[in-house]
Image: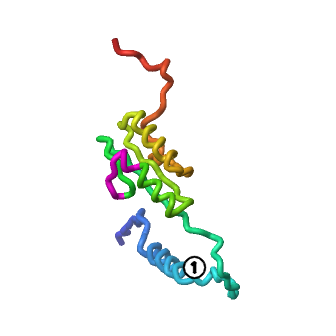
Amino acid sequence: MILETRQRRFMAEINVIPLVDVVLVLLVIFMVTAPMLYRGMDITLPKSASNTIKPEIRAVLTIEKDQRLYLDKDQVSVVQLERKLRLLKEEHADVSLYLRADRDVPYGVVVQVMDGVKKAGIEKLGMVTDPTGPERVTDPSSVRRKN
């Protein structure tokens, strides 16, 4: 009698298909039940003749690299800028202005535009910037001068 010795091999791979099935079923369950979890209270709000919350009017003033000015999407000149901003201020007293200037625009031009905004009577002026990236402000003493 000859004895055969068989060696059993174990599968070293994980069967992922049942795991994916379970995860998809759980996902569907959570997608169906999540909207039902939050339920607001049913109340009847009182009526009011005056609206206490006023929508804020926002305008964007853009200075391009070649120093062209845009108020929202309309191109304006430096001469027209103050007049248009005054009209905007007369129509909407609480207007907010956001200034977007290319970083290569000379500082004097940006200051001149900001001065025109203040002369027009607009108090809310914000500067639009990109989030901090590879550019960093460096200590002037640590920068070597080129001779």
Looking at this view, is 110 or 103 the one in front? 110
10 Å crowding of disc 1: few (<14), some (14-19), many (20+): few
Tell me the quarter of the image containing the C terminus: top left
Report which quarter residue 146 is drawn in. Answer: top left
Q: Residue at x 50, y 24 (%)?
A: 139
Looking at this view, is 115 or 132 the one in front? 115
Q: Residue at x 39, y 39 (%)?
A: 103
Residue 123 in the image: x percent, y percent?
Answer: 56, 50
Report which quarter residue 8 is drawn in. Answer: bottom left
Q: Amino acid at mark 1?
A: Ala
* Mark 1 element type: helix
118 over 88 or under it: above or below: above
Residue 93 in the image: x percent, y percent?
Answer: 55, 60
Say if the magenta span includes residue 75: yes
In this view, the residue farthest toward the left is: 66
For disc 1, the marked residue is: 34
Tell me the quarter of the image containing the N terminus: bottom left
Residue 35 in the image: x percent, y percent?
Answer: 57, 81
Instruction: Give the extent of the magenta segment.
Output: 73-81
